Image (spheres, rainbow, N blue to C red):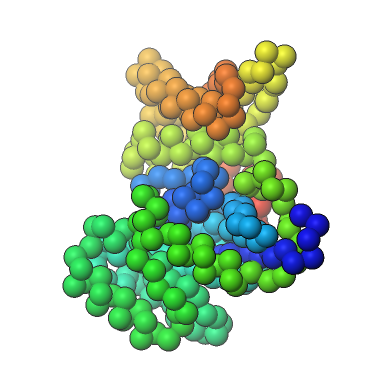
């Protein structure tokens, strides 16, 4: 893109945990770049999804859900989320309206945006789950806050209503050169993205059995002449009991997780994948500065 009239900018996608931010970024970009799971707090790093429309490049900063942090990892996640908001050329707040009201977490985000004197675009997500009267009342209440330039009724999952968001974001992007190649959809290294895929499958398989006591690392990545790749990963948990949960009876659980992860990786990489997953106990993985560097988080947040 050598044309001087190109435009490029960052779009910060913020919201309470499980509002649908990652699903929306994946829908807008048209590919999976962020972990999507029905559990809250599943996005740990600011994954960037890149969307090109005409001469405009939009770089979506998919932030962790903003919540009241207690542990070191949680504080680093929330710090990353607000940094994403500060750095952005356009801000998009995603609110889950399936509940029919503005919850305390979303209200706290609105208060902070007011405090920072930031204007944002608002995406009311999961509109297909809400009653029309409640939806309209919620939109009116959000409009009365005075900080939203636009309000959209969307379903991040189906893509309904998202085209208008893209059209309006394009108009907000500043003039400047593109930051990424036309074919690039994310700045997340493939090793990290592969680990995220497996981590998502763990969340989906285990539900509440293993809340946030696990992490996944891609230890080896070997490409072969026939086009296939061999990926070796380690799932780290904090206790032996958690290791037993991940493995399952006779290793059935980890095998199921591995199959689901391998199938998705093959689809993403468009090649045959040999995936080996090991489970190890590392009590204090949540206090290891190196893990935070890998995720792009601030250990001292």
130 or 114, which lies in front? 130
Q: Where is residue 299? Give x, y as percent.
A: 65, 56
Q: Position of residue 162 (x, y in %)?
A: 43, 59
Q: Nearer the viewer, residue 77 or 287?
A: 77
Rendering coords of residue 41 (x, y %): 45, 53
Is 103 situated above or below 277? below
Residue name at image x 51 percent, y 46 percent: 30
Q: Quadrant of residue 246?
A: top left
Q: Using the image as rendered, state which of residue 255 and residue 288 is in the foreground.
A: 255
Judge left or right: residue 135 versus residue 67. Answer: left
Above or below, 43 against 32 in this view is below
Identity of the residue drawn at 37% across and 19% down: 252
Choose top left, top right, bottom left or bottom right for residue 9.
Answer: bottom right
Q: Is residue 75 visible?
A: no
Q: Which residue does the image show at 50% across and 25% down from the upper left?
A: 262
- Residue at 43% x, 34% y is 201
């Amino acid at each position: 893109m050598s044309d001087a009239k190109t435009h490029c900018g960052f779009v910060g996608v913020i919201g309470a945990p499980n509002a649908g931010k990652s699903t929306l970024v994946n829908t807008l970009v048209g590919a999976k770049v962020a972990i999507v799971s029905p559990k809250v707090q599943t996005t740990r790093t600011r994954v960037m999804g890149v969307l090109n429309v005409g001469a405009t490049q939009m770089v979506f900063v998919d932030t962790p859900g903003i919540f009241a942090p207690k542990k070191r990892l949680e504080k680093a996640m929330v710090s990353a989320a607000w940094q994403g908001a500060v750095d952005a050329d356009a801000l998009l707040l995603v609110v889950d309206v399936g509940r029919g009201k503005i919850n305390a977490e979303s209200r706290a985000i609105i208060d902070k945006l007011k405090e920072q004197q930031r204007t944002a675009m608002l995406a009311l997500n999961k509109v297909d789950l809400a009653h029309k009267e409640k939806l309209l009342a919620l939109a009116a209440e959000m409009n009365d806050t005075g900080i939203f330039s636009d309000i959209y009724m969307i379903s991040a999952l189906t893509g309904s209503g998202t085209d208008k968001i893209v059209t309006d974001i394009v108009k907000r992007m500043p003039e400047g050169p593109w930051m990424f190649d036309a074919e690039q959809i994310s700045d997340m290294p493939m090793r990290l993205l592969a680990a995220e895929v497996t981590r998502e499958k763990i969340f989906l398989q285990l539900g509440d059995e293993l809340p946030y006591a696990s992490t996944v690392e891609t230890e080896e990545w070997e490409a072969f002449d026939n086009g296939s790749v061999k990926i070796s990963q380690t799932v780290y948990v904090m206790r032996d009991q958690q290791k037993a949960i991940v493995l399952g009876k006779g290793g059935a659980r980890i095998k199921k997780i591995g199959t689901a992860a391998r199938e998705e990786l093959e689809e993403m990489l468009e090649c045959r994948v040999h995936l080996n997953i090991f489970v190890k106990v590392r009590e204090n993985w949540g206090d290891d500065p190196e893990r935070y560097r890998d995720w792009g988080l601030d250990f001292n947040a």
